[in-house]
Amino acid sequence: MRIGLFIPCYIDQFYPRVGVATLRLLERFSDRVTRSEGEAVNLVFPREQTCCGQPMANAGCVDDAAPVAERFMAAFGDCDYVVGPSGSCVAMVRKHYHGLVKDEDALHSVQEKTFELCEFLVDVAGVESIGGRFVGKVGLHEGCHGTRELELARGSERMLPAFSKIRSLLTGIEGLELTGLDRTDECCGFGGTFAVFEEAVSCMMGRDRVADHERHGAEVLASADMSCLMHLGGLIRREQKPLRVMHVAEVFCEALEIPLDV
Amino acid sequence: MSTAHAASAAEFVANGERATWHDQALWFVRSKRDKQAHSLPEWEHLRELASQIKLHTMSNLPALLEQFEQNATRLGAVVHWARDAAEHNAIIQGILAEHDVRRVAKSKSMLTEECHLNPYLERHGIEVTDTDLGEWIVQLRDETPSHIVLPAIHIKKEEVGELFHRKLGTDEGATDPKYLTESARQRLREKFLAADAGITGVNFGVAETGGFVVCTNEGNADLGVSLPRLHIAAMGIEKLIPRAADLGVFLRLLARSATGQPITTYSSHFHGPRPGGELHIVLVDNERSKLLGSEEFRRSLNCIRCGACLNTCPVYRRSGGHSYHVTVPGPIGSIINPARDPAEHSSLPYACSLCGSCSDVCPVKIDLHNQLLTWRREIVARGLLSRPKRWLMKLTGAVLSSRRLYSWAGGMARLGLRITPRWLVYSRLNPWGRQRELPEPPKTSFRKWYDKHEEGR
């Protein structure tokens, strides 16, 4: 069994800790996905990967996104599972690769086996709770693409029973108190190139999200999407707010006392 | 690419207090919608049904429109067909001239806004009064609506007080909504009584019966067409539904989605002219058939103009309707307006963080955020993305297509962030850094760490 580690470009280059945390969590939990007794799990990091192509695709530049998407396909074609710590990048592969990739059959198979980290832990590895101990008040930012495209949680617009896979993983951690929000899943305003093309609105959206978390007493701002946190964290650092910004994979590792040696 | 939206939005955001107030006012409407939608266990089923009815209607539009015309004519209405805004305006002005009309009472109609009917009629010496309170406020201010359901949502009650003091002679400094509304009501009564004709929009035209439904909360449509003998109804061709029974689906969705009410105060059904009166229905295309012919954007004709996508849009709420420079702003407007003039409205599909809330809130299941993404592709394909942005994307794509270039560029970025002086990194050329810090550059990338620690394990 080959599990391909999908480390999105900006995580690779700017947040290596999140990559390491993802790797360590998969090492911890991936033995639960073997199809037969004694099957070896081979966690690999295909070196040919760069980016999912979302920045170009979301700007409408499909011709520039296509070769990047093809590169992703080639890098992960021989994996049984592809797992990445970013709802948005995984949603790009699963929901927006049609028309970018030539081989439709291969695409279909890659889309079926590509998972966001928390989704993989819950749906494939059957993890109900991470366990361990993490003392603090954690505000969870549920990213839009994870929520509305991958359905990691039920969007507040939908009139169907509520659930959240990320929240469920955080719930069983001792000492961890999940704080609430007035607007449970409003966009943080990152939006890729939107963050610079529409800088004013983007920053106002971000500040509103941070304020909502602060009002509810969050000490840690966590998310399964590092891109949202790059934006929110950037605002938090500029204003020197005492909020600690963490990817949920880092929270899980800290709870399980897994050292992140990077 | 025109940067029209981003620039106007930045101006709106610059008044932080006002932008926050606007955001909260509209979020309140979204919350009311959530509460009402929750009250119907079959909500998601209704959305699906409504979407299918509309898709069916759009696939059979020519036949259904002719059926509507036949039945409406049978009921005694006169049906007109307008290819575009100019024809729509000329037809209405022609009818009014024939009847020697000097004064018109008009209820809310985004179609007449889209066609700029008011200034056209005014140029022909006709006085038009918008009788919906919000519409009247924007008319008195010589502005356009900033929202399709709540036209004056961008105006505070203090400003309405000042406007009414100037225009209607109400007490100076008055801000009490009840007092201001009552004053408006009294003045509008005079307009209603003096009107020679009433113009309304149409929320739903029913092919099977030839009748149509107009939804209002103020009863102003009913009053406006009950006093004069002449009623003109302007209807976009996408407002059609096949059967009267379908109204049960749409009326339940419309007000809940729009304002969070179970139903509008008035849902008025018109079947032919009233005794002794005359009823004209103007069916308007104005580029709608262009959308009908497009595989990608056809679903946008499902729209029932409830405004729910505006209320939920985090960008609309914080940038205000006028920043879109169109009659129908927000997510739906950013789809239908580029279809009219892609060059003029090329910034609109980018006025969106692709959060997808609009698609999930839409009562007729228009895949709005996907259509916005499709529009971006169209804009690039037509060469309408600005050259710097186009080249930036080309460069980014080229770097990310090569593993070596990518690794090199990443290393340079980390190094650059460490050694470049702060004033240079955070110069005016860096829109990210105006209000935000860039990531703190780590010493190594994940892949370098992996090579060192994990390889060969």
Image (cartoon, coloured by chain):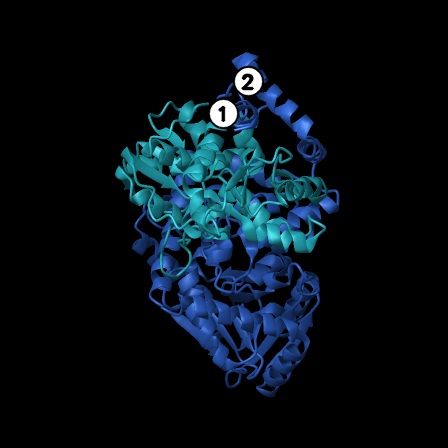
Tell me whether marks 1 and 2 sit on the same chain: yes
Residue drawn 45% across the image and 61% down it = B132
Look at the numbered discs 1 and 2 and tell me whether their residues touch, using CB distance below 8 Å: yes
Could you tell me which secondary element the residue under label 2 belongs to?
helix
In this view, A71 is above or below B33: above
Q: Is residue B152 visible?
A: no
The residue labelled by disc 2 is B417
Q: Is residue A22 visible?
A: yes
Residue drawn 42% across the image and 26% down it = A260
- Can you tell which mark lies on residue A116? none
**Mark 1 surroundings within 10 Å by alpha-carbon count, few (fewer than 14), some (14 through 19), many (20 or more):** some
Query: Would residue B241 appear left or right of B268 to someone viewing this image?
Result: right
Could you tell me which secondary element the residue under label 1 belongs to?
loop
Residue drawn 57% across the image and 50% down it = A94
User: Label 1 to label 2, Cα distance in Å?
Assistant: 9 Å
User: Which of B256 and A253 lies nearest the eye of the viewer?
Assistant: A253
Residue A132 location in percent, x, y? 29, 37
Q: Which chain is blue?
A: B
> Where the N terminus of chain B falls, by quadrant?
top right
**Mark 2 surroundings within 10 Å by alpha-carbon count, few (fewer than 14), some (14 through 19), many (20 or more):** some
User: Which of B314 and A137 lies nearest the eye of the viewer?
Assistant: A137
Q: Chain of mark 1?
A: B
Residue A27 location in percent, x, y? 44, 37
The residue labelled by disc 1 is B439
